[in-house]
Amino acid sequence: MKVAIQNNAKVLALFAVACTALVSLVSLLTKDTIARQEQQQLLSTLHQVIAPERINNDLYQDCQFIKDEEYLGSNQSQTAYIARMDHVPVAVAITSVAPDGYNGNIQLLVAINVDGTLSGVRVLKHKETPGLGDKIETRKSEWVYNFNDKDIIDEKDLRWAVKKDGGMFDQFTGATITPRAVVNAVKNTMLYFNQHQKDIISNTTSCRGQHD
């Protein structure tokens, strides 16, 4: 009996090793493919918030890491993508986080024109409730398009709130927390851009290769 148990244990150990090796191999073989897919998805989203005809630089490469927990919603580094036409900056797309979503963090991409108006906003990742909070997605509703062309005066700009709080943005029926969180995060991202625009557009160091 003891020998049989030992043999079974050896078989299980070998099986575990083989499975681990197989998973590692698959991960290695698919790593580049996944990276390319993620890059294409990001480029597609960038071109949704900054029209391709407005720029002629490599938007994916022309970027830098930025960090500001107060305005960008996270203690992790975020990315600013600088859009240029003939080397002249026209807009910046910034990743940021709404930390107070109903079900946790909501990751955003906020594109701001150099004149301070919004070029576009997209949700990159969230865990909001299907049928309620997920209306922040473009495939669920057109709500996020309401940010287009909006500007901000300062931190006390009362327009930057949902209508329930006296602002200019609609809330969702049965779900106010999610749109309130997104509006606040977009507002803070715009405030950050207004304070740091000169530093962002003058920095030519690419973020590619630093963390890739």
Image (cartoon, rainbow, N blue to C red):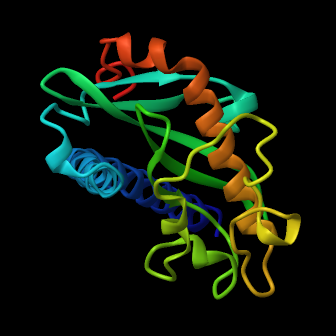
Q: Is residue 103 visible?
A: no
Q: Quadrant of the N terminus?
A: bottom right
Give how far across and how far down residue 198 sits, in percent: 46, 14
Q: Quadrant of the C terminus?
A: top left
Q: Observer-nearest residue: 43 or 87?
A: 87
Numbered circles on residues, count: 0
Q: Quadrant of residue 194?
A: top right
**Quadrant housing residue 63:** top left
Q: Is the residue 70 above or below the residue 20 in the image?
A: above
Nearer to me, 104 or 4: 104
Q: Residue sitting at 56 percent across and 74 percent down?
A: 143
x%, y% of residue 105?
A: 69, 53
State whether residue 109 is above or below residue 82: below
Q: Residue sitting at 51 percent across and 81 percent down?
A: 141
> Measured along the vertical axis of the image, is residue 97 above or below residue 142?
above
Q: Residue at x 45, y 74 (%)?
A: 138
Q: Is residue 49 visible?
A: yes
Q: Residue pushed farthest right?
A: 165
Left or right, residue 21 beside residue 43: right
Q: Is residue 50 above or below residue 196?
A: below
Image location of residue 61, percent across then percent down: 24, 29
Q: Which one is in front, 36 or 4?
A: 36
Say which residue appears at 73% left-offset and 67% top-offset. 178
Q: Is residue 189 left or right of residue 45?
A: right
Residue 75 pos. (x, y %)? 69, 29
Q: Is residue 114 left or right of residue 131?
A: left
